[in-house]
Image (spheres, grey):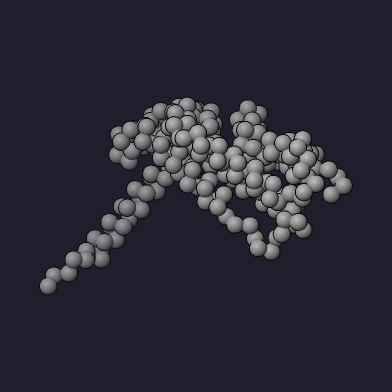
Amino acid sequence: MPSSRLPAALDGRVDGRRNRTQATRHQILTTARSLIIAGQGEPTAKDIAEHVGLTTRTLFRHFPDMGTLLRTVMIDAQTQAQAVMDEPFPSTLSPGQHWRALLDLVIQRRTRTYEFLLPLHISPSIQRHWRARPAANIDKGVLRRRSRLTAILPPMLSSDPLLFEALDATLSIEFWISLRIDQALPAPKADEVLRYAVDRILPDTL
């Protein structure tokens, strides 16, 4: 009975072609994302192709149209952001005793998440797809963000309405967008400013 497996040399060529296709596809998506963050909210196929070093014809072999490409940028961003948000806290850190270490983890994870999600808030085309989600899903995300913050703060902080709202606003994606886009700060500098603001909000007595 003949074997259904490809000869080793042919099998290797198929794998190599598949890897190159995946690498090119990844480069296209990464370039589209970078152009959006750099200020091109509506990058064209020509813009992306030129930055990657492709022809637009080759680009459209990977994505049938720009709508599909930008939706893929959106889906990839959401997938990566969700993976970060689902990371559990270390079991060795308890909210009462290690709340500052937990807050530091929250800041790290939010800035990573927000970087993934930036294109969703900048590109009008992606916004049209993203905002088509049920409003309940967006509200759920805000509630999750606030409940996670409440869970790690000492009661004297979480029960202070003004302090809590100031801290929640500083740790929101809107503040991150202001730093990264409106003020054009690179991610490391934006992180430094955010942490500076958090330190000024928290009382010195704790």
Farthest left residue in view? 1
Residue 28, how many percent across, how many down?
41, 40
Residue 77, how many percent across, how many down?
49, 42
Residue 162, how many percent across, how many down?
77, 35
Please identify the quarter of the rendering in which residue 159 is found: top right
Q: What residue lies at 50% left-to-right and 39% top-to-bottom?
A: 137
Farthest right residue in view? 205
- Rendered view: 8 above or below 168: below
Q: In this view, does 136 lie to the left or right of 72?
A: right
Q: In which quarter of the image is the N terminus?
A: bottom left
Residue 69, how many percent across, how many down?
38, 36
- Rendered view: 191 above or below 37: below
Q: What residue lies at 13% left-to-right and 70% top-to-bottom?
A: 2
Farthest bottom residue in view? 1
Foreground residue among 167 and 59: 167
Please identify the quarter of the rendering in which residue 14 is found: bottom left
Q: What residue lies at 34% left-to-right and 48% top-to-bottom?
A: 21
